[in-house]
Each structure stands twice: as structure tokens, then as C-alpha cells.
Amino acid sequence: MTELEIAVNKRVGEWEVIQESGATLLPLTGPGFTGMRNLGNSCYLNSVMQVLFTVPDFQRKYVSNVEKIFANSPSDPTQDFKTQVAKLGHALLSGEYSKPRDSEDDPSGDQVGIAPRVFKALIGRGHPEFSTNRQQDAQEFFLHFINMVERNCRYGENPSEAFRFLVEERIVCQQTNKVKYTQRVDYIVQLPVPMDQATNADELQEAEHKRKEAEAAGVPPPPIPRASIPFDVCLDVLSESETLIDFWSSAIQAKTTASKTTRFASFPDHLVIQIKKFTFGLDWVPKKLDVSIDVPETLDLSSLRGTGLQPGEEVLPEVAPPPLMTPDVEVKGILGSHGNEDDDSLYSPLLSPALDDSIVSQLCEMGFPLEACRKAAYCTGNTGIDAAMNWVMGHMDDPDFSAPMVLPCGSSAPGSTPTETLSEEHLATIVSMGFGRDQATRALRATSNVLERAVDWIFSHLDDLESMEVSEGGALRRGRARATGSPPRGPA
């Protein structure tokens, strides 16, 4: 089946465009011109790794020190992350696997290339998607690989810092004009595609009209041209403010409307951009947008630079929203000494979960279980249907996906399941990596007691663990300093 799929791919027009069909091409060989063989579904991995090893930080970390890395590799190098990455980087850049043929009949030369079987098996081990032979998304693999680099470079040079930047989110309460600033670490910028801004809109409308006519006449429809979207338009959409409905304002202790803008608090050395070509149709079926976007050689991002708190701005007070109560909590237990059974005015706010009803209802209309929809709204902080939808997609395989949401009084970790029995073996494994037991417990609770996901979670939530104790040598404190304390790495 894999051979058939590759054969079909070679016959489509886009393959000919990629291969520059009809042109006389000169094969390039030598250092820096080594290809990677497609293992049937590894194009996402090949493209990402070839790009990463054009970055000087990765070359310096893994290729310049390749002899030292090989000399210090463990007895089983197939299971060592640093060894396998160095092996791949050296093979790509050395030219040893990209040599010209001595003659037309010599099969040993002319882009012999690399088949990254051992590397793919190691990188995908334990992952529900990358351990399979299914087609995958390059952006998701990039973030997965960067996560592994972060995990394995806690005590030395970290090449993923070349892509790391800080995102500043500014939220303004529309009723009080008070503001809230937050920062988070990211490695990639996702740009939406405004299809209504296509420069060839007239051509697209005419083609759609002809398609409908052909469909009515029962004849094959003509080919539809590809929409052309200017890159600057995608960037402008990123700079626009987003309206938050039912935002809980700590200033008025109630829900209201707020606006959110996203800016760069720092810039990376190398900016990775993903064009969001996948979207949902009116029937909520995922589809891929057929668009053409020309990226300019130079980008001016000065308008997207964050400014931080400005003179005259008043900050929203740090007051937590009403706690989310569990369905099995009795009213008498909530009353305590603040009310009585005849007068519920003092405890009625506690009975109203801090959930956006519109988000929950929209998710339910898509066919997801009610409890899962409630968890999605709560765990994403009622920030919108897109964030909630992403949460649902990322947790559909959780064993407690549709189970009742259990957040006892005093729980401050959205999405946690304190009542779940955690594996002592998993706890010991995470603690042995230099984290505290409380940190390991929180990570396992946030990921349904799945060890691989818990390790990924703990490295992507270093800021959330800031107030928790650091064990054995302060490893987490050093990692967090690199994640949040470094100055901007490049100019706008």
C-alpha cells in the first residue's frame, strides 16, 4: 500500500512542480547536499530535520562535537538521544552519503541518501502518533522534537533556544478598562489564512460559478485556481484584537466582555511560522485550504513588539474566579458557618461553575460528551471555542475523557484529578529526573497518569511550577531561568 501511495503521489501535478518537471537539473553532491529517503510516511520528519541542521546552533551542538559524543555514547547507542541526533546531523552535513557516480552504471554514488529508521524509532517511541506509520504533521513533529531537545539539554548548551521567544498577551476589561498582562514561552507563530482577502477573488468566484454550472449539466468541472493570499494580510490578522465573551473580570467580580491582543515580548534568532491551512467547515469537518502565500525575504515585526504595562494603565486585581464545585458536593457542606438552609444568598455564587455556557453548548452540538465539554471550557479558562476544541482533540484518548469532572474545594489546578490513584513507579521515574514529588504528582494528575505525557507536560509547564520546591541540585530552577529569564535574543 505504501508503494502504491508513493506511485500515486508521483503522478499528481504538484509532484511535477516540486521536481521542476521538464527542466534539466544538475545533481548536487557533497557536504550539505545529502538527501533523506522517505520511509513511506517520514516526509514530515525528513523536512524538519533537514531544516534544523541548517541552523548554526544545532550544527554546533551535535555536529561539531560528534567525535566526543560518539566516544561518550552508552553501550546501546540506538537508545541514546544525543548519539542519534549527532549521527543524523553528521550524515547530513559531512557529504559521506552524497557522492557523485563514477559512471552511469555505478549505483553507489549520486545522492545515496539517509534512511533514518533508527532515529525515527527512537524519536517516536512511546508517542501515540509518531510511533506509527501514519502520515503526520510537520509542525506537531517540530514541537515534539524541540520538547525532547529541551528535556535532554538541561545541563548544557540548548540549541532550541534559537527558536524560543516570549509571547505577551494583553487583556482589557471593556467595562473598567483595567488590564492584565501575561507572558508565555513559545517556539512557533501560527498565522491564520483570511480567505476573503484573496487577491484573485474575482477569478475564484468565476471558477466557482463555472463549477456549479458543470455540476448541474453533469459534466466534469473545470479546475479551480488556487487562492492567492498576501503574507502581510496574514500578519495583520495576527495583530488584530480578539473579543472575549463572558470574560470573568476580577475588577467587578462578574462576567463581562474583554479584548485580547497578542504581541512579542522577545524575538528569537530564527522565527518559525506555520500557516494554518487546516480549518473546520460549516459541518465541522476538517479540511485543508488550497492557497498560495508568497513569503517576503524581509519581515518588519516592529508593530508586533510588546510594550508591557504602560503609564496610566491600571492592572486588574489578582482575585481568583468562583471555584468550580463538584456535582457530589452537598449544599450543607458548602454553607459552613456562612449561611443556613433557609437563606442561600451567601453561598449561591459558589454553586455556579466558572464555565462559559456558550463554549460548552457549541462543543455539545458537535457531539462531544457534556462532561468533556465542561472540562474543555474550564481547563482553557473560557478563552474561546478554538482553544476548547484544541483541548478536546488533545484529550479524546484520555480514559476519563467523558467521566464527571471532579475538582474538590481547594483544588487550584484546572484539569487535575486529585482523586486518581497515581503510579508510584511513574512518580519515582519523574523524581529521579530531578523534579520534586509534588511536581511529579501534579504532572501525572494533569495527564491521566500517563508517564510519557507527564514528562512532556512538566517540561512545557515550568513556569506553572515556579512556586513549587526544586529537588536535587535545582535542575528545574536552571531550566526555568533559561525559559523565562533570558533577554530578547534578536532584533525585530
Image: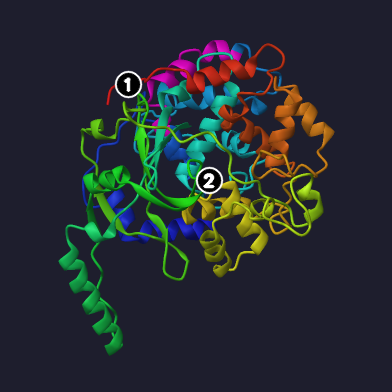
Q: Amino acid at mark 1?
A: Gly
The answer to whether residue 108 is visible is no
Residue 264 or residue 87, whichever sits in front: 264
* Residue 67 badge: none
Q: Quick one: SS at disc 2?
A: loop
* Residue 490 badge: 1
Q: Toward which corner of the image does residue 221 lie, by quadrant?
A: bottom left
Q: Where residue 265 appears, x then y in whole percent?
A: 37, 28
Alpha carbon separation for disc pair 1 and 2:
40 Å
Residue 204 or residue 481, whichever sits in front: 481
Determine if the magenta segment contains residue 59.
Answer: yes
Residue displayed at 39% across by 47% down: 175
Q: Is residue 112 left or right of residue 270?
A: right
Residue displayed at 21% across by 47% down: 23
Q: Where residue 153 appears, x then y in whole percent?
A: 56, 20
Residue identified by numbered label 2: 253
Q: Main secondary structure of the magenta part?
A: helix
Determine if the magenta segment contains residue 62.
Answer: yes
Residue contact at pointers 1 and 2, CB within 8 angstroms: no
